[in-house]
Amino acid sequence: MEVPGKKANADRLPSHLHGSEDDVELYCMACDRDGPWVSAYGYCQDCNEHLCETCYRSHRKPAPCRNHVLLDRLYMPKVQNLSSPLGPPDLTEQCKHHPGELIKYFCRDHDILGCSPCITLNHRTCKADYIPDVSRNFEKSKEYKELLHTLNVLQESCSRIIKTSDENKRDVETNRKIVGDKIRKFREEMNRSLDKWETEANKQAERVLNEESTKAKTVLMECMATLKEIEKLHDDLATSAISGKCNELYIKVKENEDILNSYTQMLSQIQEDSAMGTVVFEPNLTIQNIFRTEKEIGQVILQKHSAEKVPPHRLLKDLTKENNKGAHEMKQTGQKSNIQKGSFENLTATTLGKINVKKSMFTMGCEISGIAFINSNNLAVADCKTNEIRIVDLKQQKVISDIKLSSPPHDVVLLHGDQLAVSLPLEGCVQVLRTSGKLSKDNLLLGQLLNVDLGCRGLAYNDGKLVVTFTGRNAKVQIMTLDGTVLKNITYECQKKEYGPGYVALDCGNKLIFVSELVTGRITCYDFEGEVVRVYEKLFRPAAGMVVLDDGSILVTGYSRNDICLLSSDFTKKRIIIPEKDGIKYPQCIELDRKQNKLYVGCENKSALFAFDLKIGK
């Protein structure tokens, strides 16, 4: 029995499929693969297989076989070729699950290829395509062209990565030489300093020892001269006594009584002067402690650079409409800080309390001039009154580590890893601090020292570059690397030498530098090339610490106004978000925890930080 409307004409069958009544018995090819031989009842022209009655009647039920042309016993071929069934010559891929079966179908629901048994047994209700039907002119299809395009992009990307990798290998060798040279030069500089100090110490020792030697010679000569005079007097008196000249002896004794007293005093002084001291060498304790505590002459740090993003992965996703939609949704719902859009109009601040930054109740008061956010648990504060940097545990609300510096610090900033940079204006240097592992008591260590000009104050850091402000005669802003190499020198124009840039903040997204001026309160915005973008005059008299929010607006401490103001990104509007009534007095520096949106304020002559919670109001 045949499929309605698709009755096959036996005369149109190929000649090699015709047989005679004497032909051998035909068997079901489907049952032959899975079990005993069963006599053929019909034939499927699409599958090129003989079928038993059971397979024949159920063959049309699976979706892939619904339109197959079936021939009953009368019209089915009388010759059975078991070794090479009819089919397209390039349909040769073997099924992994059914040995001997060719892959002929593609299940669109499960996106897999399969043979006839695969589709019949496991994908009976799925939407499946018969490959010979859907593969016609496939080389002209959009899917094939997009695949070729993606392969070309992948190929170009691989070639570009290979080229970049070759360049990177050469750069590594160049970098190896540069790092080695710097380590060697630093060691040579240390050797020169040690040689110089050794020479000076030897000169000092030689000078002291020569003085002692000269003193010993002088004492010896004076003592020998006195001895000769005493012996001469002794001989004269003895001669008079032996010769019986009593009157002469009496007169000489009386005449030389004063001389004898002077000899006694002289010998006493000579004896006192002859006391010799022992010259000893006392090492410089600072240098000695460095050799005892330090385990390395410096750190070798890998500063990663952002690599060029390769687009092929995104292009492969774009091959389907569904992925395009997903990518669009992902882009629209990306994570953002909750103080971005609408920050200026709706930002509010709620007081959270105070955090003690004194080491103990017996220590003197504090003057917090700089704050650096390390992580959600720790802050670093610069105390310019006690010349200290302290690490504050925000959960325990106490100081967990501190280090004494050689002069008052002004600002502190977090570098990469666990390192901090501290500006020391009176010494004209930036001191790098590092921790020996986990932050704890007494594990802050002195690191690299960058020699800069006097008056260094504000610090900011991003992507391996340190931004430093300077006050005084050479008021300026410098952008430098962490080895002290100056990349950009920005001259700062101010009316008086005591004026000049104080604190500095960065808007890395827009590549902008904001500088607040001491005394006048002027805020100047530069681009990374040093060009002035905009200026706001006499904003806070004076302005001090600053924080740039994600929308470009700026939080600025009003030192003499005892408040925190918010300045719009275009410098056209400002408003107070933390008023004087909230308790801050002479605020100098601020820092923001961007993940938790908490603001920390340091004030002059205060032993605590003020904490505020920032939110976007409705």
Image (cartoon, helix red, strand yellow):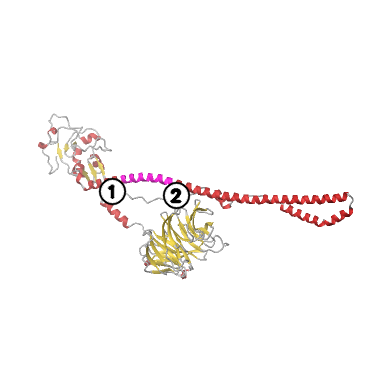
Q: Is residue 22 left or right of residue 374?
A: left
Viewer-side residue, 561 vs 63:
561
Q: Examine the rendered structure and indicate whether residue 473 appears above or below residue 311.
A: below
Q: Is residue 265 left or right of residue 339?
A: right
| Residue 62, quarter of the rendered image | top left
Queried whether the magenta region covers residue 189, the answer comes back as no
In the rendered image, residue 492, in percent from the top left (x then y), is placed at 42, 63
In the rendered image, residue 499, in percent from the top left (x then y), is placed at 46, 66
| Residue 535: numbered disc | none
Range of the magenta residues? 158-178
- The residue depicted at 85 percent of the width and 55 percent of the height is 253
In the rendered image, residue 90, in percent from the top left (x then y), is placed at 20, 38
- Identify the residue under disc 2: 301
Q: Earlier in the sequence, mark 2 or mark 1?
A: 2
- Identify the residue under disc 1: 316
Instruction: Look at label 2 and name its amino acid.
Output: Ile
Viewer-side residue, 29 vs 381:
381
Total marks in image: 2
Mark 2 secondary-structure assignment: loop
Prevalent SS, magenta region: helix
**Residues packed near mark 1 inside 10 Å, few (<14), some (14 to 19) or many (20 plus):** some
In the rendered image, residue 114, in percent from the top left (x then y), is placed at 25, 41
**Residues packed near mark 2 inside 10 Å, few (<14), some (14 to 19) or many (20 plus):** few
Q: Nearer the viewer, mark 2 or mark 1?
A: 2
Residue 477 visible? The answer is yes
